[in-house]
Image (cartoon, helix red, strand yellow):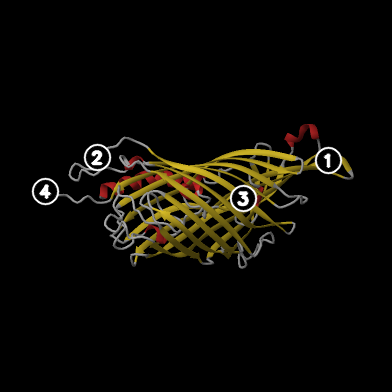
Amino acid sequence: MFERISRVILISIPFLLSIISYSQGLGNSPYSSIGIGDVMNYTGNVRNMGMGNAGSAFFSKEYMNILNPAGIANLKYHRNDSLTKYEVGMTLQYKFLTNGQATSDSWGANVKYLAYSFPVSKVYSTAISITPLSSVQNYYSYTSSFPNALNYMARYTYNGSGGIYQLQWANGIGVTKNISIGLATNFNFGTITQSSTTQLITDPYNSYTENTVGIQNKTNYSGLSFKPGIIFSKQFSNENKNTEGKIGMPEKGIRFNFGATVEFNSTINSKQTVYSFVQNTASLNLLDSAVSQTRAPAYLPSVYRIGIGLQKPNQWTLAADLVVYNWSSYSKNQFNNDSYYAKSSFNLCVGAERQLTNQKRFTRSNTIRTGFMLSSTPLLINGETVYDYSFSIGGSLPVGVKKKEDDFTGRTARLPALNIALVVGQRSSPGSIPGSLTETYYRLNVSMLIYQKWFNKRRIQ
């Protein structure tokens, strides 16, 4: 067991560093210049992404539920999941931007999340994951002339990068055969940098010789938040009471699931430092000095999530989630509140999943998914709400060669799963609003999920 833990830790370190180093690589997004950036951590894993980000109310032996800590528990008497799970997700995105007659496009890729879960007892499981909570990546510039100096021009450039990450420790326990509860403790941390520069161009044919002056705002965040969760699961039929919970023995009944989580409005620490600088054409700072430094609390939004669904285990799943964000007390720090935020926003997510079970070779079963999400974002442009809507398709495919897990037990090992979700969506304000921006994105999400038996009970014959 300890050898397996060490192996997982060693494998996890480079992926953890990759998330922290490269998780803001999804391409230029001017909307991310507002507040803490694009909120990203409520999409779940690639399975959820293929179902329109729905599925928080379900248990599964095949997947980790990183949306609801109660979803990693084992329900008493009928569900015994003894597998550890290790999953790494990545995202590749192409984005097309339109603002009036101006257009641009960009590519990006990042490590989306890393998650690891294992059972502690027959009813209690724990999991550790790290995901970006928000992402900031924006770059735009324009040039204007001076009315009374026709030969003089100024180039203005705005650039943002960074984000906030969430390291989550989730614990779930089955309290009855139908109810489980859980609690996730989140450590939120990260740095967001926004800079603006001005270059005075006196000679348009030799602008490369002109220096640039600018201001950089760098804010560091750190603090805890908590997310309790609950799941109620009720089976409509008792036809499978003798086989329920056994791998390879599909359940015959249909289950109704209800789940809920609350991530309370959290106060985290922020340190904001403002720098002024003069930069030459080689992007080297000639002068660099800190103008001011302030420390203040920052307030993240409260997040309420409700999920419902029907499921015929090992066959099909229908899911719907409603996520409501309360931004009324939000501020990224007390010195800089954003007037671009509404008081509340929501995500409506619906999805379906169909498992193409191979009864003779259960470990090679394939899965297909589809879903839709409508999001009323908290962003306000000229008083109008920015909406985000997307359609997704996806699936899971076992990979590898069938083998025995252990010479003593003779059990068949569950093969690793390759999960894929293709998401096509658009974010924009309704109608033709002056200054509005439309983002059309194509997002490919891929993850590899590895299973392993936590303990094997040895038998002496």
- Could you tell which of marks 1 and 3 lies nearer the N-terminus? 1
Q: Tell whether 340 sits left or right of 404.
A: right
- Could you tell which of marks 2 and 4 lies nearer the N-terminus? 2
Q: Which residue is mark 1?
A: 152
x then y, percent, for residue 460:
11, 48
| Marks 4,3: beta carbons within 8 A | no
User: Can you tell which quarter of the image residue 121 is in?
Assistant: bottom left
Q: What amino acid is found at the position of numbered circle 2 in the picture? A: Lys
Q: What amino acid is found at the position of numbered circle 4 in the picture? A: Ile
The answer for how far apart the CA atoms under marks 2 and 3 are is 45 Å
- Could you tell which of marks 4 and 3 lies nearer the N-terminus? 3
Q: Tell whether 269 sits left or right of 155.
A: left
Query: Residue at 88% across / 45% down in the picture?
Result: 147
Furthest-left residue in this view: 461
Query: Residue at 36% across / 65% down in the picture?
Result: 178
Q: What amino acid is found at the position of numbered circle 3 in the picture? A: Tyr
The answer for how far apart the CA atoms under marks 2 and 4 are is 18 Å
Q: Which residue is mark 2?
A: 404
Nearer to us in this view, 348 or 28: 348
- Circle 2: element type: loop
Which of the two discs, 4 and 3, sits closer to the camera?
3
Q: Which residue is mark 4?
A: 460
| Marks 1,3: beta carbons within 8 A | no
- Could you tell which of marks 1 and 4 lies nearer the N-terminus? 1
Residue 28 tag number:
none
Q: What amino acid is found at the position of numbered circle 1 in the picture? A: Tyr
The answer for how far apart the CA atoms under marks 1 and 4 are is 89 Å
The answer for how far apart the CA atoms under marks 1 and 3 are is 44 Å
Q: Which residue is mark 3?
A: 389
Neighbours of disc 3 within 10 Å: few (<14), some (14-19), many (20+): some
User: Can see residue 199?
Assistant: no
Q: Tell whether 277 sits left or right of 256.
A: right
